[in-house]
Structure formats: structure tokens, C-alpha cells
Image: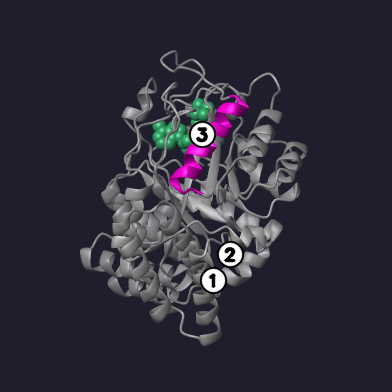
């Protein structure tokens, strides 16, 4: 189908059936260290690595690449589920239309504002708006109004600075309207690129159209989007097939529009109420395989952010961070209204239910700097401009100072004394170790003084 060449993917997988030699693996890892990516055949060789020592070499190469491109910062966001109404029948999702166990709810604009306020009081600055594929009477305008509502909410010293959106695919005209709402990234997961599996798992509703979903990013770019996020729901089909198909999707976008995706999400199937398939994934992905997937994606597309959600447990999240993850959600609820009440059903069970403060303490203990940065999007450093900085590893020169500013704001406004002490020590260490040229170092210190004096939203 289109740019997913099923026959070619299967033929490649069949060709790489044996465990590779150490030399073969090491040659690929050496190439990956040049930060220019690796090709589909090389990806398949790495998929077959089982030897523990070689796996460790794969992981340490992924750590190296992540460090080179992104440094020690980790971007944090929260999903905001505005509605669980849905016209589809995805067999793995609690929101599917015929699931009578689910209490349905589309939040009113007042309720959306209340949810936003709760997130702001926790310290969030970046939101991912999520919805099922059915909207209240006003149709898709409901989403546009919800975005406007979220941006309008303010609390002392804070407001939401970037909204990304994960909703069903739109027409070019609708994408234009969404783009005009000033969102950051439009995100959509293909779920599975394997068409027969896709058809089986999405039997009814608009989502049954595989091709319409597959071409969503083409329409988004045509409508003017610069940043899109793609993903796979792991557990539905053979992960090697999915990874290869995802790379074909990226290649297609790069060839056609000159830019690849801004982010890749790697959700794994979680149990969902009233969705028996989710309890028993057809192609379960073990923790070891999952770590391998993250490491391989990091090497294959070094410049693309990888997003890990609270579907994963704290220990799995801890292990995957160093392998290539650059963004995580935190303190999430997947039921509409879940931050201010518990009035509706959630989409799936969460592996990590810790509040944001606790997640941040954990991240800091691992030496990462939590970031709420939205600078690139605000300065128009998006699409090709972003990629040109990300590809040679230059983006971290912006990321680290901006991460420091947003973390310093968080420490001032939301942290307890314990985190304040540990956080300020981490900031000091990072400035000393990682910002070594003087005009920049002084500028960072200057901005930190301004933040301590009450200024907010400083970036460059
Ligand atoms: N309704 C839109 C759609 O399906 O594209 C957008 C929002 S949907 C709530 C977001 C994502 O949740 C889906 O793309 C799917 O990958 C994921 N999801 C659904 N059921 C899940 C489950 N049981 N476990 C983990 N992720 C799930
Ligand atoms: Fe609806 Fe999305 Fe859930 Fe499918 S995954 S049932 S489209 S909310």
C-alpha cells in the first residue's frame, strides 16, 4: 500500500533471520556514532542481536547518540483528555463505540478550563490534547474551541505555552483550521502498519480506512504543519515489521516534504476495560525487546524525539530514558475530567501514576534536567529549521539553557525544599560542566537571577 511496501519488508525480514556476527554489529554501531542514522538492513541486523555483551554495546551506543543530540534534558508534558466519545471500534481501546462499560463524557469548555488550571498548579506548561473520534454537536470546532480555552487560562506567573494534539486524522481543510489554532505538533499513531492486522482490529467507523490514516501526515504537511509526530501501538503485530514500516513512512515524508517527523511515540498495549484484546496482546513485546526498540530507533533517526508515556512503569521509564527517550508525560490521567474529578472512564490502565513532583525528583536523582521548554515552537524554530540544528547535534546548545530556565521556574514556584536544594545543585553542576563558553554562561546566570526576582518565560 502506497509507501509501505509489504512484500519488500517481509523479504528483508526473511533475509535477516540469523543472529549477526559481532563484527557486523560493531560496524553498524560505529556508523551510528556518526549521528547520520542507519538504514533498514542495518536496523534488521540490530533487531537480531541477542548476545548480552553485544546488546550492552547497542545500548551504550544509543546512550552516546542521545547524549550527543539531546544532552541531559528531558521534556515533560501532560495529556488532557477532553472527550471519550468515539465512533470507532478499535478492539484494544476502552473508548470503542460499543463498549457499554465506559461512562461517556465530552468536557464542557468550563471543565476544560478547570482541568487546565489543575495542571498549571502542578507546574505543567505543555499539554497534549487527546480525544476520541466523535465530537459534540458542533463537530470538529469543539477541538478548536478547546484549544482556545486552554491557551486562555492563566494562574499567577503561568499559562500553557504549547498545546500538541492527538486526534483523528483530518482533511486538508480541517488541518488548516487546526494549524490556525497555533498548536505545536500534530500527533497520530498508525497503530499497526500491517494492513491485514489493521483491518481486523479496526472493523468499523472512520478509522477502518487504513489509507486515510496512513496519509494523514501528508495532508497535515500540505495544510502547513511543520511538526508532526508518528507512532506505533506495540503489541498488535511483529515489532520488527512495524519498525521497518515506520522507517518507510519517515523516508516518504522526508522525500516528499523535506522533513521527517518531529517525534516518534512508542506506546505499548495496556489493559483497557471492555477491550478483551488489550488483556492479551496478539504480539506481546517483552521489556527487553522494548528497550531494544528504543535503542534502535535512537540510532536510526537520531534527530527525532522519542516520547514515552505513563503506560510504562517507573522502573521501565527509568531504564529507557538513557537509551534515547527525550520526552515523557507525567502525572497523567486518561479519563476526561480526571485531573479535577473522577467522573468518567479511563482509556487504559497506567503503569506510572506518580504525581509530577515525584517524577521530577526521580529524574533529577538520575542526573537529568526536567524541561518544560517551548522555545523552538515560540521562535519558529520548527520543521526544517529545527532539523538543521538537530541533525548535527547543535540543538542541545539551545535545549540545555532553556531547560535550566524552565526548571528554575518550576523550583521557584512548585517545588518543596528538598527538591529546591537538589535541583539548584544540579543546575549549578550543569552550568559548570556543560556550558563552558563564557558569553553563554554569563547570560544563563543573568537569566537565573531574573527568574529568582520573579520574571518568567525567558528563553533563547
Ligand atoms: N482517537 C484518536 C486515535 O485513535 O487516533 C486519538 C486519541 S487515542 C485516545 C490515542 C492513542 O491511544 C491511540 O492512537 C492508541 O495508540 C492508544 N491506545 C488505545 N488503546 C490503548 C491501550 N489499550 N493501551 C495503550 N494505548 C492505547
Ligand atoms: Fe476511538 Fe482512538 Fe480509542 Fe480507537 S483508539 S476507540 S479511535 S479513542
**Quadrant in which the N terminus is drawn:** top right
| Residue furthest top in the image | 100
Instruction: Name the foreground residue: 243 vs 63.
Output: 63
In this rendering, the answer to whether 258 lies above or below 394 is: above
Instruction: Please tell me which residue is depicted at 61% across the width and 62% down the height of the picture.
Output: 376
Q: Are marks 3 and 1 in contact (CB under 8 Å)?
A: no
Q: Main secondary structure of the magenta part?
A: helix
* Foreground disc of the pair 3, 1: 1
In this rendering, the answer to whether 384 lies above or below 177 is: below
Q: Is mark 1 within 8 Å of ligand 1?
A: no
Q: Which mark is residue 447?
A: 1
From the top left corner, tell me how far across and down residue 441 is, in percent.
Answer: 50, 81
Crowd rating for badge 2 (residues with CA inside 10 Å; few <14, some 14–19, many 20+): some
Crowd rating for badge 3 (residues with CA inside 10 Å; few <14, some 14–19, many 20+): many
Q: Earlier in the sequence, mark 3 or mark 2?
A: 3
Instruction: Please tell me which residue is depicted at 53% across the width and 49% down the height of the picture.
Output: 126
Instruction: Please tell me which residue is depicted at 44% across the width and 58% down the height of the picture.
Output: 412
Which residue is labeled 3 in the image?
Answer: 115
Element marked by disc 3: helix
Marks 3 and 1 sit apart, C-alpha to C-alpha, by 31 Å
What are the residue bounds of the magenta stretch?
108-124
Which residue is labeled 2 in the image?
Answer: 458
Instruction: Name the foreground residue: 44 vs 118.
Output: 118
Instruction: Name the foreground residue: 76 vs 275.
Output: 76
Q: Earlier in the sequence, mark 2 or mark 1?
A: 1
Marks 2 and 1 sit apart, C-alpha to C-alpha, by 7 Å
Name the side, left or right, on which 230 lies relative to 141: left
Element marked by disc 2: loop
From the top left corner, tell me how far across and down residue 247 is, in percent.
Answer: 52, 55
From the top left corner, tell me how far across and down residue 279 is, in percent.
Answer: 32, 28
Marks 3 and 2 sit apart, C-alpha to C-alpha, by 25 Å
Q: Earlier in the sequence, mark 3 or mark 1?
A: 3
Amino acid at each position: 500500500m502506497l509507501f509501505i511496501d509489504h512484500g519488500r519488508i517481509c523479504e528483508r525480514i526473511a533475509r535477516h533471520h540469523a543472529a549477526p556476527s559481532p563484527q557486523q554489529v560493531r560496524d553498524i554501531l560505529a556508523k551510528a556514532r556518526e549521528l547520520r542514522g542507519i538504514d533498514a538492513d542495518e536496523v534488521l541486523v540490530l533487531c537480531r542481536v541477542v548476545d548480552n555483551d553485544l546488546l550492552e554495546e547497542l545500548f551504550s551506543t544509543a546512550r552516546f547518540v542521545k547524549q550527543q543530540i539531546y544532552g541531559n534534558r528531558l521534556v515533560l508534558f501532560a495529556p488532557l483528555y477532553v472527550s471519550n466519545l468515539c465512533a470507532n471500534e478499535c478492539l484494544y481501546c476502552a473508548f470503542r463505540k460499543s463498549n457499554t462499560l465506559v461512562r461517556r463524557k465530552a468536557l464542557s469548555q468550563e471543565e476544560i478550563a478547570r482541568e487546565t488550571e489543575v495542571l498549571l498548579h502542578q507546574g505543567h506548561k505543555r499539554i497534549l490534547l487527546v480525544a476520541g473520534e466523535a465530537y459534540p454537536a458542533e463537530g470538529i470546532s469543539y477541538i478548536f474551541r478547546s484549544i482556545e480555552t486552554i491557551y486562555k487560562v492563566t494562574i499567577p506567573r503561568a499559562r500553557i505555552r504549547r498545546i500538541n494534539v492527538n486526534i483523528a486524522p483530518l482533511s486538508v481543510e480541517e488541518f488548516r483550521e487546526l494549524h490556525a489554532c497555533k498548536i505545536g505538533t500534530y500527533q497520530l499513531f498508525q497503530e499497526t502498519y500491517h494492513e491485514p492486522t489493521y483491518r481486523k482490529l479496526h472493523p468499523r467507523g472512520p478509522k477502518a480506512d487504513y489509507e486515510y490514516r496512513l496519509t494523514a501526515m501528508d495532508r497535515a504537511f500540505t495544510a502547513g504543519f511543520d511538526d508532526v509526530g508518528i507512532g506505533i501501538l506495540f503489541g498488535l503485530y511483529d515489532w520488527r515489521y512495524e519498525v521497518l514500516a515506520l522507517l518507510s513512512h519517515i523516508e516518504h515524508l522526508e522525500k516528499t516534504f523535506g522533513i521527517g517527523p518531529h517525534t516518534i511515540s512508542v506506546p505499548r498495549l495496556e489493559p483497557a476495560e471492555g477491550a478483551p484484546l488489550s488483556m492479551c496482546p496478539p504480539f506481546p513485546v517483552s521489556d527487553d525487546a522494548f528497550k531494544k526498540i528504543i535503542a534502535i530507533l535512537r540510532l536510526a533517526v537520531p534527530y527525532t524525539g522519542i516520547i514515552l508515556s505513563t503506560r510504562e512503569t517507573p522502573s521501565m521509564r527509568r531504564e529507557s530514558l538513557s537509551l534515547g527517550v527525550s520526552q515523557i508525560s507525567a502525572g497523567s490521567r486518561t479519563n476526561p475530567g480526571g485531573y479535577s474529578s473522577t467522573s468518567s472512564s479511563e482509556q487504559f490502565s497506567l503503569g506510572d501514576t506518580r504525581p509530577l513532583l515525584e517524577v521530577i525528583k526521580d529524574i533529577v536523582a538520575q542526573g537529568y534536567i526536567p524541561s518544560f521548554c517551548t522555545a523552538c515552537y515560540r521562535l519558529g524554530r520548527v520543521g526544517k529549521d529545527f532539523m538543521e540544528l538537530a541533525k548535527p547535534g547543535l540543538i542541545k546548545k539551545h535545549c540545555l539553557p532553556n531547560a535550566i530556565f524552565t526548571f528554575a521556574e518550576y523550583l521557584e514556584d512548585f517545588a518543596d525544599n528538598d527538591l529546591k536544594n537538589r535541583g539548584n545543585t544540579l543546575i549549578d553542576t550543569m552550568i559548570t560542566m556543560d556550558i563552558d563558553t563564557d558569553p553563554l554562561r554569563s547570560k544563563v546566570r543573568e537569566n537565573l537571577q531574573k527568574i529568582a526576582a520573579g520574571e518568567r518565560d525567558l528563553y533563547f
